[in-house]
Image (spheres, rainbow, N blue to C red):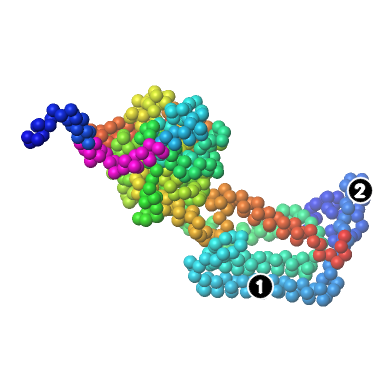
Amino acid sequence: MKKLSARRRHPLAALVVLLLALACTGGLYAAFAPASKAQADESAQSLAIDEGKKLYAVGCASCHGTGGQGTSDGPSLVGVGAAAVDFQVGTGRMPAQQPGAQVPKKKVIYSQAEIDQLAAYIASLGAGPAIPSEEKYGPEGADIAKGGELFRTNCAQCHNFTGKGGALTHGKYAPSLEGVDPKHIYEAMQTGPQNMPSFPDTTLSEQNKKDIIAYLDAVNGDDTESPGGLSLGGLGPVSEGLFAWVFGLGALIAVAVWVAARTAKAKKS
Amino acid sequence: MSSQDIPEENLPAEQDRPHGAAARPADETNPFADPGLPPHEPRVQDVDERAAKRSERTVALLFTLSMLATIAFIAAFVAIDVDKSVYIFPLGHISALNFALGMTLGVALFAIGAGAVHWARTLMSDEEVADERHPIEASPEVRAKVHADFKQGAKESVIGRRKLIRNTMLGALTLVPLSGVVLLRDLGPLPGTKLRHTLWSKGKLLVNMNTNEPLRPSDVAVGSLTFAMPEGLEEHDEDFQNEIAKAALMIIRLEPDSIKDKRELEWSHEGIVAYSKICTHVGCPISLYEQQTHHALCPCHQSTFDLADGARVIFGPAGHALPQLRIGVNDEGYLEALGDFEEPVGPAYWERG
């Protein structure tokens, strides 16, 4: 103690105290700060946000505004969350090619890394649904039958009973869900892209979403069999009726004409 | 029946005129020339017995093919496992049993038809025959005989003399149809006021049909779509389908300033509105909701309702706006109905007014 009190008037004492205080604060911060695990992560995150901001300025800002606040050509992106970005850009819907009733799915022009950077930037503008992890939409623990029930209650009115899609008003349509990445289906339910209503976790739980995705894989997956053969798009009475009228009736008429056109007489006239 | 009642000039000139007989030219009594029938031409099978034999064998072969196909149908039904799947171009992966049954039955029926057509065209007589029209009325002799027979029958049955039998028989025959008339009662009773009321009443909670949990306002996000049923209704209830067919609700949330209809705003809670899910045209469940335009489209006949404007009909055959349910929040913070629908849900009917 004596030693310490003797040196407290040392010219460097103030500096030492300041350094100690700083180290303490830093240490305490490191110990208690939220998401303390990752200084490295944090800087990676802010780097991603910066990169995303640059990508945004080039590819998105002309419609959605320089700060994501929206313009007359595009809605505000504040609070839409990373999931919306991952869906819209990950399915090629964004950036949109031209205005119209509906922005269609097309070739994806960003890499997944770039999409993640854009998503990080948009997520930094306001809290919204995050990109789901794989265990949320994977097949483990999913109830296919319950998923079918939920799909028919919530989704089938627009997307057809097995997710083949259908028409809406004024050129809008519900796209087919065949071959859509389960992650994107999950994100679409969460965020409600374009004219699709959203189905947030509060009204359609995470388990419900998982069940629906498992049902779609069961009825629409790559190895789904069609016991009836030619499914004609799975659209139900529309395509089946058309097929029966055009080809079924057409074949009958053709046979009738063929039978009547060939005379059985010995002397052909 | 003879054609003796018909004036001579209305009859065909020669009823049993041979094929290819001379046509009759127009004259004063008949201004239309009769072109007559073309001469009959024989078929190969009529003149060549070997060709006829060949035709016979073809027809027999088709009928035999049909028999074999039927036997194959039965064999396929017995032998093929119901879960077996095969790949057949261009049908893709298909149930082997379905495919075998369809093909064999198709061949069996087609071969019978094809055989019959071939038989009729090559072997059955194809002599053209003119079949003349006959008067519908019977000849006077036949009519007189029927009258006499009837009178004699009536006399022999003593129905005119034994009045008791006649009257009781008439009574019995009159009463028998009454059983059928009485059974019609089972078509009723009339629905009464059932069509005017649903399970909704003041204080009933709005239960989310996905989770079976009552909804809170914070659960319903702007742009989301949720289906709700009244609390107390269980999916296993005997009358579940009858009740949900009237009580089904669409819950959406709008920004309060985007609601154009004053009553809709009053009946909503913080922008949450509850509309009947039953189309007012013919009662299809209507829930093709577009969250940006706030339009709901009916999949059956494309009736379109503007849910931001009192569910007004903006397109299609529906005659009424969708009924809105007045909702609020109870003390525990759950969404509740503030009464039943004010008007009948679903399609209009005579007494609806």
| Residue B39 in which image quadrant | bottom right
Task: Give the percent coordinates (x, y) of residue B35.
Answer: 88, 53
Q: What is the CA distance from the residue labelled 1 to the residue labelled 2?
A: 54 Å
Q: Which residue range is magenta in the image?
A: A24-48
- Magenta portion: prevailing SS class: helix
Query: Does residue B347 appear anywhere in the picture?
Result: no
Q: Is residue B281 above or below residue B24?
A: above
Q: Disc 1: which chain?
A: B
Task: Give the percent coordinates (x, y) of residue B303.
Answer: 51, 35
Whether labels 1 and 2 belong to a single chain: the reply is yes
Task: Give the percent coordinates (x, y) of residue B140.
Answer: 73, 55
Q: Is residue B217 above or below residue B96?
A: above
Task: Give the percent coordinates (x, y) of residue A249.
Answer: 66, 54
**Dot 2: what SS?**
loop
Q: Amino acid at mark 1?
A: Leu
Q: Disc 2: which chain?
A: B
Q: Which residue is mark 1?
A: B65
- Residue for point 19% across, 30% down: A12
Q: Is residue B334 above or below residue B67?
A: above
Magenta segment includes A27: yes
Judge left or right: residue B99 versus residue A36. Answer: right
Q: Nearer the viewer, residue A45 or A89?
A: A45
- Residue for point 54% across, 60% down: A228
Single out the mark in the foreground, 1 or 2.
Answer: 1
Q: Amino acid at mark 2?
A: Ala
Point out the image quarter for the N terminus of chain B.
bottom right
Q: Which residue is mark 2?
A: B26
Q: Nearer the viewer, residue B134 or A84?
A: A84
**Dot 1: what SS?**
helix
- Residue count near mark 2 (Cα–Cα under 10 Å), binned few <14, some 14–19, many ≥20: few
How many discs appear? 2
Query: Does residue B27 appear anywhere in the picture?
Result: yes
